[in-house]
Image (cartoon, grey):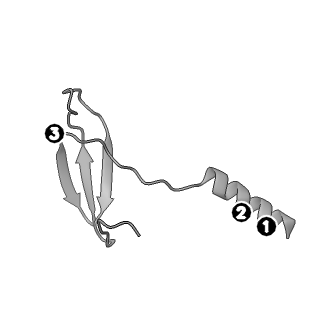
């Protein structure tokens, strides 16, 4: 039983899932492929180019309220 608790604690410490909130940007590209909306690059307010790629899974429901 102690080993199970130890594994749970280690998985919590090292496998946490965190949300990603991208910085505002202009001149980015995006494409819908399957159920995912992929975002590529862009520039921030200082016109510095970004090489970030991230996606939003549109098959899952989401809202703007915190609960």
The secondary element bearing badge 2 is classed as helix
Q: Categorize mark 1 by other alpha carbons within 10 Å: few (<14), some (14-19), many (20+).
A: few
Residue 38 in percent (x, y) is at 26, 52
The secondary element bearing badge 3 is classed as loop
Q: Tag count in the figure?
A: 3
Can you identify the residue that label 3 sits on?
Answer: 26
Tell us which disc is closer to us: 1 or 3: 3
The secondary element bearing badge 1 is classed as helix
- What is the residue that sits farthest to the left in this orientation? 27
Residue at the image position 72 percent from the left and 58 percent from the top: 9
In the displayed structure, 47 sits above or below 66; it is: above
Q: CA distance from mark 3 to mark 2?
A: 42 Å
Rendering quarter of residue 11: bottom right
Can you identify the residue that label 2 sits on?
Answer: 8
Residue 36 in percent (x, y) is at 28, 61
In the displayed structure, 12 sits above or below 23; it is: below
Circles 3 and 2 in contact, beta carbons < 8 Å: no
Is 15 positioned to the left or the right of 49 in the image? right
């Amino acid at each position: 039983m102690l080993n199970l608790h130890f594994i749970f604690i280690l998985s919590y410490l090292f496998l946490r899932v965190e949300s990603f909130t991208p910085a505002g940007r202009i001149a980015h590209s995006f494409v819908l492929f399957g159920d995912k909306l992929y975002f590529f690059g862009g520039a921030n307010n200082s016109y510095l180019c970004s090489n970030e790629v991230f996606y939003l899974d549109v098959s899952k429901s989401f809202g703007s309220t915190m609960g």
